[in-house]
Image (cartoon, coloured by chain):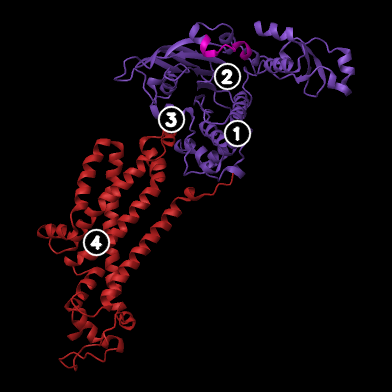
Amino acid sequence: MSAALPSAVGPLARAAAGGGPGGPGHPVIPDFGAPSGCVAHDATFCTDWFTAHWTNLFWPALVQHVELTLVAVVIGFVIALAAAVLGHFQAWFAAPVSAVSSFLYTVPPLALFQLLVPATGFSVLTVEVALVAYSLYLLFTTILTGLREVPQDAVRAARGMGLTRWQILFKVEIPLAVPAIVSGLRVTTVMTIGTVAIAAYVIDEGLGSLILKALQSPFNTQFIGAGGLAVVLALAADGLLVLGGRLLTPWAHARRTA
Amino acid sequence: MSQETTEPRSPAGAHGSPAAGPAGAREPAEAQEIVFDRVVKNYPGAGAPAVDELSLTVPAGEICVLLGPSGSGKTTALMMVNRLTEPTGGDIRIGGRSIRDMDRIELRRSIGYVIQQVGLFPHLSIADNVATVPKVLGWDRGRTKQRVAELLDLVGLPVAEYGRRYPAQLSGGQQQRVGIARALAADPPVMLMDEPFGALDPITRERVQDEFLALHERIRKTVIFVSHDIDEAVKMGTRIAVLREGGHLAQYDTPQALLKEPADEFVARFVGADRGLKRLTLIRLADLELSAPGAEAQEAEPHGARTLPSLPGDASLRSALSLMIADGTGALRVTGPDGRVLGTVTLDAVRKAGAA
């Protein structure tokens, strides 16, 4: 059952095992195999080890990282959008939401995880609740600002033409707030990707978990690989959002032909 | 409806039978009379009312200019018609129906609304901007598309060339033409225009004003037009309502009557000391009885430099007077559309017509 060693036992053990198959007939002492020269010399970054452990280590962690981020940003976006629309319709609503969300935003992530664990345990739920709480402030503020900065001429014209309040919201205000909404999503997504890494203190998921475990060992490849992946993920997510934003707002980039 | 109306610009008769609308269109909606009946608007906290007991009737198909300085309540009066502001007292009736009895959204959809800042939707193409009201009214695609093409043609921005552009890709004058097309989309019997040409440069403004007047002769709508510019009011209005601060109606008259006999000191000052000249803009040379062209004037045609200056018949008396002063002559020749001399006009005739 040596192959069933959970990855949580430690990257070193797995690393040393070299992914070798276990099973009956194998010695009780795991076969560590022959480490590559790079690993043996404890180099800063071993590409061969990174690629060898892509499928069993890095890829699953990356997918978990993306999932944790996506769930948090989507839920946070829905809540923030609803709150921003309410705050846009009823100005008095904006101040308390802003106060609560900015307070949540100031709590250090580790402290917030710590506070939540007694209630929701060492669970994905704890992590998502905290991530959503962090996302609210930036999303709410940018969406509300976007809605408020829609040109008032367009809104007045829409009112005068007989569009209902909701038609003005969906046909005029939200489309015109898209650039602001996208910029809020970009900052929030990048920030959430960073915060998910800290969630490794609560759950054994995501790139943060690889980093956390690697911190305890002198072997740097896992640490650098996972950290690098988090950076690449953040950049990729940011780029995708920029691209999506541009596709949604062809009008903002139309050339003057006149 | 137009029995007592003097139509300064349009040829007699153009009023009675609205020219058929855009090519192939359905019968355009019948223009409707708008009545302000002792309308009051008080803003909470403000001492004096913004509009005070305003009563006036805009006959169907006419352009009524609400003219006044800032603070005279002209925009407030306009916005009460489509209930962007609710009147505090009194009533407004469109085609006999009180606006209070109508659903606010439906009321607005039946009224064209044009504002100075145009307010085009920057994220929608020109065609989609114009299609806004037809879409919320649930017209089918074919009908909407046809209507958009018709309207953009009407304002001189063919859909094939301009339909897919965004507002930011048009000039200010073009944007306001789209604004007018958009306001006309659902063929409303009534249009409200809030200083629609105020943001345009003088040359563009003049052109768009002329275009709108030509358009109005084709599509007969009752128009309420807010302006603070007496020249614009005289040019655009079949009637002018002069408002003074606090939303009091100082005078409501045709441009001619307003310029000839201002009701009081305020109106006289507002229309300006040069109101005599402004009156001359309302009369065209062709409206005067011309004296027969002097034989020698016609003979001298090939070497016309030394003969009397000439102007086309649709030029205003103001232009004629200006030309006579500039040339130091006491008369000029009036030419027809084909360039033939129709007759001569003397300084004296201009003076008499201006005083009439």
Specify the label residue A160 is tagged with.
3
Q: Inspect the image, locate mark 1, and give the three-letter code of the amino acid beneath it.
A: Val
* Residue bearing mark 4: A195
Task: Identify the residue shown where x is 56% and y is 10%.
Answer: B258
Q: Earlier in the sequence, mark 4 or mark 3?
A: 3
Please state the extent of the stretch shown in magenta in the rendering.
B268-278
Which one of the lettered chains is coloured red?
Answer: A
Which element is circle 3 on?
A: helix
* Residue bearing mark 2: B231
The CA distance from mark 2 to mark 3 is 27 Å
Q: Inspect the image, locate mark 4, and give the three-letter code of the amino acid beneath it.
A: Thr
To the question of a shared chain for discs 1 and 2, the answer is yes
Mark in the foreground, 2 or 3? 2
Which element is circle 1 on?
A: loop
Give me the chain letter of mark 3: A
* Residue bearing mark 1: B155
Q: Are marks 1 and 3 in contact (CB under 8 Å)?
A: no
As for residue A152 lying within the magenta part, the answer is no
Task: Classify 10 Å Cα crowding around label 2: few (below 14), some (14-19), many (20 and above).
Answer: some
